[in-house]
Amino acid sequence: MARRAPALFAATLFSSMLVGSGASWAQQQEWFVPNQGQQQQQRQTPAQRPAQQQQQRPAQRAVQPNPAPLPPGESPPAAVIGIVDVQAVQRDSTAFNAVREEVERRRQKLNDDLQREQARWREEQQALANQRSAASPEELRNKERDLQERVQDSQRVFRDRSRDIEQAAQEGLQEIEQALATVIRQVAASRKVNLVLPRPLVIYNDPPFDLSPEVTAQLNKVIKSVTLPPEGAQPASNRPAAAPAQGQAPRRN
């Protein structure tokens, strides 16, 4: 069980940070689209589409080698149990809190930019409405079409920025997740623990079973911070594979 720590804790890491703060942000913001009565299907938040794409993609998990099966007839070893409260660990993790604060800062900046852009779109639409008595119908149609095209281009930019924020957060959390899995195995081995359970599965335990304080202390020593890709930089998951060095044949899968 201790070898499978990444699979046990990945969902908790992401749900507490990405889903918690990102969902509330997404529910508060809607796209502004000229002629909204005819364009309702285009109203979408910059975080909704990436969220849908993330739900369609299988969650990434660190692959751990399976332990060798027991020989036939041999009993498993006696269970020595340890418990880890992942929420408590991440609450006290300097790296996790730093990633969360940086992601929230980027989301807030994206939200502020979106609000300013929406206000500008509304001003331009109002200006077009004021020109109806002076401009020809064809001229108004051309201007409205131009405004809609610029709005749609801006929407794509905001969706791309939102997607990049979520992917950068995912990369940072995966790095913390891998370090946490390693620390849990090390702490478990030092206590001769061969079965680690997450705290929500345990109704009651005596304090000596809880490995969380030691795991937290070791995690903060192992990984103090995570460097996220700079804003505007392409996340590692979207970067093309590096070209082979000169004279080196490309790798074949």
Image (cartoon, rainbow, N blue to C red):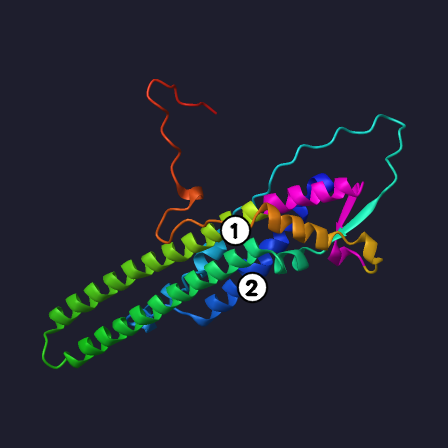
The verdict on residue 192 being magenta is yes
Residue at left offset 52%, top offset 51%: 225
Instruction: Decide which of 229, 61 is in the foreground and name it.
Output: 229
The amino acid at mark 1 is: Ser
Give whichever of discs 1 and 2 has the lower sequence position. 2
Query: Which quadrant of the rendered structure holds the N terminus?
Result: top right
Residue at left offset 27%, top offset 75%: 122
Percent x, y of residue 8? 68, 48
- State the SS at label 2: helix
* Vertical relation: 117 (above or below) 89: below
Percent x, y of residue 229? 41, 49
Q: Quadrant of residue 49?
A: bottom left
Q: Quadrant of residue 30?
A: bottom left
* Vertical relation: 6 (above or below) 116: above
The amino acid at mark 2 is: Gly
Percent x, y of residue 186? 70, 41
Q: Quadrant of residue 248?
A: top left
Q: Is residue 201 visible?
A: yes
Q: Nearer the viewer, mark 1 or mark 2?
A: 1
Tag 1: Cα neighbours inside 10 Å, few (<14), some, or many (≥20)?
some
Mark linked to residue 209? none
Mark linked to residue 20? 2
Residue at left offset 60%, top offset 40%: 62
Left or right? Give the position of 105 relative to 81: left
The verdict on residue 118 being magenta is no
* Vertical relation: 123 (above or below) 56: below
Tag 2: Cα neighbours inside 10 Å, few (<14), some, or many (≥20)?
few
| Location of mark 1 (residue) | 225
Magenta stretch: give its range. 177-202
